[in-house]
Image (spheres, grey):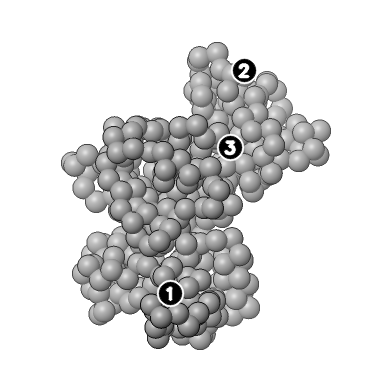
Amino acid sequence: MHSNGHAHRITLAASDRTFECDAGDVMLRSALRAGIAFPYECNVGACGNCKFELIEGEVDVVWPDAPGWTAKDRERRRYLGCQSAPRSDCTIKMRPSAHYAPRHAPRRVTGTLTERRAITHDIEEFRFTLSGDMPFEPGQYALLTLPGVQGQRAYSMSNIADNVDAPRELHFQVRRVPNGQGTGVLFDALDIGTRIGIDGPYGMAYLRRDVKRDILCIAGGSGLAPMISIARGVAADASLDGVRLHFLYGGRTPRDVCGRDMLEELPGWAERLHFQAAVSDVMPDSETTWDGHVGFVHTVAETLFGENLRDMEIYFAGPPAMGTAIQRALIALKVPFEQVHFDQFY
């Protein structure tokens, strides 16, 4: 990334609001650090939700091949906030939306890998101790800068920010992506003691503490982490004592299923915290007899809760196809849109 080493001032057109964008930072994240409610979703160039129009000034595009940026955007001087580093002071046109106002201003810290453990055959937990504080809400994610990997990778925290005095830790539960560059480095090349850049928190699918409805968390794959964080957040928050939480994990086969042991150690297990799992593919193999639910999680959720889903606060995270199927099912059941929370990962 070209940068001449100092901050540039960014002005929002048709308002008197300005913010500083430091060298090595991008428009979107520096705006959020300044408390400006800049709309975004994936933060890594895929979705196109963070587009702005460049009225004055010049920017460098970090990833020119970002799928969220089209030829038409280029012609119209539209850029992605998450992929644009200012080369000068700039004026931009962007419509802030209160929904995206950051609960915690994202910050950049160093994380040292202190511990890792296997959760399933292809999911591991990686624990980092941070050089500085990073408050976050259950369900949020951070961006990791991994050695030799272009750009950042978004991973959700599985722990909760409980102890302000202890060195802050972030735990990530990550599923290995076949031939994935990011998870390849994380799983195979990152030694204990390695330090990396971590930037966060980000994400809109965090625990809504002011809502007292019963909760359904639906997870698949790496979606385990943010849903476990939300369950831990509910168990730790006295104001949510009256809320029941149902956790539904979807795996392809029985050996993919995980999460139950993490819920079992929380206060309220089996009284108000419940775990169920569904697998979409049951092979009659000798190792596992599966007596749980069979089918895709969205169908199992419908079977288990039916119209009661309309009265629940629903959080979900997992592979894109699973997310799409869940959204369709909830729309068909007329679950109010504002009760459904997820972050779009690609």
- Location of residue 143 in the rendering, given as x and y in whole percent from the top left corner: 46, 41
Q: Residues within 10 Å of mark 2 (few under 14, many from 20)?
A: some
Q: Residues within 10 Å of mark 1 (few under 14, many from 20)?
A: many
Label 1 sits on a secondary structure element that is helix
- Tell me, for residue 218, which label it has, or none: none
- Location of residue 295 in the rendering, given as x and y in whole percent from the top left corner: 53, 80
Q: Is residue 329 above or below residue 344?
A: below
Apparent side of residue 95 relative to residue 291 in the rendered image (left or right): right
Q: Which residue is mark 1?
A: 254
Closer to the eye: label 3 or 1: 1
The answer to which of marks 3 and 1 sits earlier in the sequence is 3
The answer to which of marks 2 and 3 sits earlier in the sequence is 3
Which is more toward the observer, 327 or 62?
Answer: 62
Q: Quadrant of residue 78?
A: top right
Q: Which residue is mark 2?
A: 88
* Residue shown at 51% from the left, 21% from the top: 23
* Residue shown at 51% from the left, 66% from the top: 340
Q: Which residue is mark 3?
A: 82
Closer to the eye: label 2 or 1: 1
* Residue shown at 35% from the left, 76% from the top: 275
